[in-house]
Image (cartoon, rainbow, N blue to C red):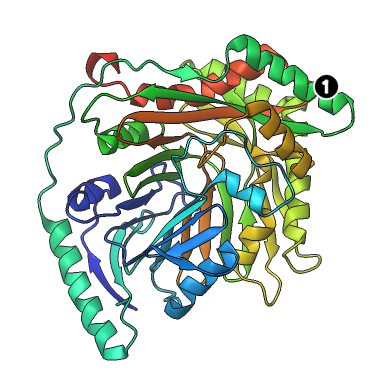
Amino acid sequence: MWSRLVPPLDPAAAASRLRGRWPGLALLDSAMRHDTLGRHSYLAADPFGTFRVRGAQASWNGAPVPGAPLDALRAVLAPYRTAPDPDLPPFQGGAIGYVAYDFGASLERVAPPVRRAGLTDDIAVNLYATVVAFDHRAGTCHLIATGFPETGPAARAAKAAADLDALEAALAGPEPASEAAPVPPLDWRSNFTPETYARAVERVRDYIRAGDIYQANISQRFEAALPPGFDAFAFYRRLRARNPAPFAAYLDIDGLTIASSSPERFLRLDGRRVETRPIKGTAPRSADPAEDRARAEALVANAKERAENVMIVDLLRNDLSRICAPHSVAVPTLCGLETYAGVHHLVSAVTGTLREGADGIDLLAATFPGGSITGAPKLRAMDIITEIEGDAREAYCGAIGWIGFDGSLDTSIAIRTVLIDESRAVLQAGGGVTLLSDPQAEYRETLTKAERVFAAFATGEDA
């Protein structure tokens, strides 16, 4: 491992210097500063390899890889295994990308989605030999190089030195001027109307009354055509300004852009320590401080929202118990209040110790997709989601993040997340439905979660 300390930069400003210069830009962006959740951001570009899964077929740099998809990913990463440097930020090179929600149908016996838009793969990650690592608490910026895909010591060292020089030179250059054209108001269309969403909530409540489930997360999918020349990165910069989040991300993968402002960690593996942080319970912010405080206090005291959170905590305790050492799973935070730009959330933390012989890919297989965006019991809730929503969720409610060459990982739940191709944008928003749910209130909650993302598409006076 080779590294170089450089003057600190804003992550988005640094990304703008690399964008257009190298392909495969990936920014994992702690746009909302927090000593622990938002401490680090990571920037990478020019990957040396691409790993994809669609259906049951995995590929590495376009060539098929035999075996089950996650076993194939493990095999692709294996030649680049490195020990971590404890003096550097946690991600020191490795895979960055996403796992789509629908990949969960290949891990468990659940129904696959009926309709698929085809925007995303089931898994898409790029492998990066160099990383720009930002430590916001320390105020430092490290350039990190592994020298991969070279494997001989001398060749690796030479490549790492050249990579560090090239990266430092690119970051030292001027930031390109933004020439983003004004964006006219977009014509967003949903696969639900208020009335059909209310009926969907009632169908979930019927399943709860019948004893099938305790709750299920139902989302609506918004889609809009984009004007020619739409600047996805300019949109992302507006999104991170309007809705800063500790797990924001911008990924450019084979013509598809993913722009996310997720507040929710899915899985973190640091050594053997595992953490997941489910969000269940939402209240909109108010511009009036007294009213905002009252809304936060009402959320904390809300029996329905707390019960919803506790049910998901129980689900995740069970999921982690499948892969963690006996008696190691704990709940250090239950229904804690976290406040973001547009909403208050109830957030819990569930932790454990990964059992001996297991790795991060085993952890992902045992827990994916996250329980906070499925329901309880998980598998039956997933079948009901597929039945009611119809469309594939694709990246929405999947995972975005990194897997390091040292085996560590950190991923978010892909909510507050937009998929952008050459002609359209797709956004989904949902919420957990329980027996106590009010259909109109659940519909309004989906709009509350999406409104700041919608607002980020506006420019000029429309903003």
1 relative to 84 in the view: left or right: left
Mark 1 nearby-residue class (10 Å; few <14, some 14–19, many ≥20): some
The answer to whether residue 82 shows anywhere in this view is: no
Write the residue at 46% across / 39% down.
Answer: 118
Classify 102 as above or below 153. above
Q: Which residue is at the far right?
A: 210
307 relative to 448 in the view: left or right: right
Whole-percent x and y of residue 148?
32, 76
Q: What residue would you read off at disc 1? A: 206
Residue 238: name its quadrant: top left
Query: Which structural element holds mark 1?
Result: helix
Classify 343 as above or below 120. above
Write the residue at 70% across / 20% down.
Answer: 200
**How many labels, in total?**
1
> Which of the image's four quarters has the C terminus?
top left
The answer to whether residue 40 shows anywhere in this view is: yes
147 relative to 204 in the view: left or right: left
Q: Which residue is at the far top?
A: 195
Amino acid on which disc 1 is placed: Asp
Classify 93 as above or below 17. below
